[in-house]
Image (cartoon, coloured by chain):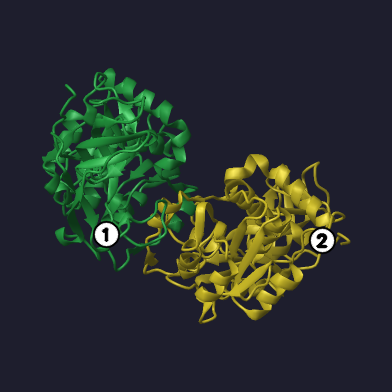
Chain colours: A yellow, B green
Amino acid sequence: MTPNTYKEIQLANRPEGTPTDSDFNFVEKNIPTIGTDELLLKTLYLSVDPYMRGRMKDQKSYVAPFELNKAITGGVLAEVIESNSDDFKQGDIVTGTLDWAQYNVADAKSVQKVDPSIAPITTRLGILGLTGLTAYFGLLDIGKPQQGETVVVSGAAGAVGSVVGQIAKLKGAHVVGIAGSQDKIDYLINELGFDEAVNYKDDNFKEAFKKTVPNGVDVYFDNVGGEVSDAVIFEINRNARVVLCGAISAYNNPEGDIGPRIQWKFITTSSMMKGFTLGDYAHDFKTGAQDLGKWLQEGKLKYEETIVEGFEKTPEAFLGLFEGSNLGKQLVKVADPEFAKL
Amino acid sequence: MTPNTYKEIQLANRPEGTPTDSDFNFVEKNIPTIGTDELLLKTLYLSVDPYMRGRMKDQKSYVAPFELNKAITGGVLAEVIESNSDDFKQGDIVTGTLDWAQYNVADAKSVQKVDPSIAPITTRLGILGLTGLTAYFGLLDIGKPQQGETVVVSGAAGAVGSVVGQIAKLKGAHVVGIAGSQDKIDYLINELGFDEAVNYKDDNFKEAFKKTVPNGVDVYFDNVGGEVSDAVIFEINRNARVVLCGAISAYNNPEGDIGPRIQWKFITTSSMMKGFTLGDYAHDFKTGAQDLGKWLQEGKLKYEETIVEGFEKTPEAFLGLFEGSNLGKQLVKVADPEFAKL
């Protein structure tokens, strides 16, 4: 069943501004033979994530930039096709940071086994994976929401934001989501139980937002940056905590991102803002995954996935993130498993 | 010796942009009689501080705005002329937040006695007063400089900045000061022992600054905001701490203060920025004052005062802060004591 060749997606150019299809190259490769302790993996699902835009720039950051004319790497769910490791057998499902490719050869130590009996395997790329953990640690370790406080989350209908808002509700906060369409607003209120949700594309966004935070803002979990964040930061209370997770509004802005300086607001309120990346919490992943798994099983957390089918649609799915075309976690379904029964 | 009348300085207008002499009114008043537990105080020295500009605006902040056509209040050193309190006697020196006036009537509980034998009394308006405590808590509680780290302080030759840099040296940091004249640069290096100092008014400031922080910036104690801070924040390391104490460059900017959005830099470095006001640390003042007093007595801290003479020069001294005309603490000497021997 395994073909002799497969395709991988390479970064063809460092995009200026919004990436386009031409920044990605599909390159055909031969399926290699695997060495000691290696696995041949067939990709089932790929995760496309906003932070990957940053890795397309040639700049110092918390992870090295992608190399030109090499495969882009990201979160992958795959099936073990061949194994030279005692720890894995054919038909096992694994996850790891792997090439955007139809097949990967990987060291057995570089992937984690996924138990398909716990939850749908795609949750391991979303709410039970790096996405859920990002929400968990950013909100609870930096934001520290208290009962009765007001928590605002931007990009609220996205993969991270939707988990942030739900955890904040579990902690007893008044939760306000900011998103970019009426469908998303309805989803946040009706499905996820947010107290309020505001559409940042509305002309009267600032006034509408202000009405949702009559007691000010204690925690702001920021996925988007830009003018949305300017508006939120203007409403922060004393001792507010601003959690900087992402700035998707700025990722494709090569001219630089200009706005009101915010330091004065933080001085006059004794407030704090902190960036983070998930790697800061690697030592605590187990705790986070346990809590998220428990809440999911208890029905306290819901999630949504937007899945496009076909490896060739990967660039399109990635580019869609910047237009807000996803609800919840954006995934690409690459193939069905050959051996596993899911 | 006490006259029948005295003058106080009232806020005549809420200044737009840089305040001018006409925003201050000198108003003559009769010396009142004092009630139970009250003191009649003769002002010896006034403190003028950048944060007071914020109180001239009619906006919500950490302290209420000054009221129009009422006396401006600030840090004052005064001599007790008459006392209806058992805790104070004629000739005692006291300090407190009092009117900008030649005489004050104050509740005995609202002022603290100053022991002139410990250090010159003016230190209680500077390095041993709110100024020194601001440097102490901002740097040590938020900045947390570690041995070998790089600490940058802007407004470095000012009252707060000069103490920040010296405490950072005591903690074993590589200390870089940013100031606005060659005299100040020389003072920081030759008198206070800063490792490096850079003049932000130089055309090549950014390049010159960058050379002083070859290992990046771990702690930035920010007194000025604006483009100086943009340049420093661009060089922060992983897990950097930005202490927001003041933003003097923006205080007189009614059009708003625009610059590059800085969130991305904090995300990619997992860094933190926090505002504070001294009131946040009221419960710990004693510890701070003890440490500062000890370091001063041991000769580990030096300080400079810029003193103008004459109550009528108070507005001029205040306005000079925004031109950087002060080295160290800016004070106004209002009068000599009548009874105390200093």
Of residues A154 and B282, the one drawn nearer to the viewer in this rendering: B282
User: Circle 2 sits on which residue?
Assistant: A120
- Mark 1–mark 2 contact, CB under 8 Å? no
Residue drawn at the location 16% of the way across and 34% of the way down: B187
Task: Give the CA separation, mark 1 to mark 2.
Answer: 69 Å
Counting labels gives 2
Image position of A296 (left or right of B318): right
- Give the image location of residue A192, x and y in percent: 74, 67
Of residues A11 and B89, the one drawn nearer to the viewer in this rendering: B89
The chain carrying label 1 is: B
Location of the N terminus of chain B by quadrant is top left
The answer to which quarter of the image holds residue B17 is: bottom left
Badge number at residue B69 = 1
Image position of A30 (left or right of B157): right
Q: Can residue A295 be seen here? A: yes
Provide the secondary structure element on which disc 1 rests: loop
- Give the image location of residue B33, x and y in percent: 27, 40
- Amino acid type for the residue under numbered disc 1: Asn
Relative height, residue B80 to residue A283 (above, below): above
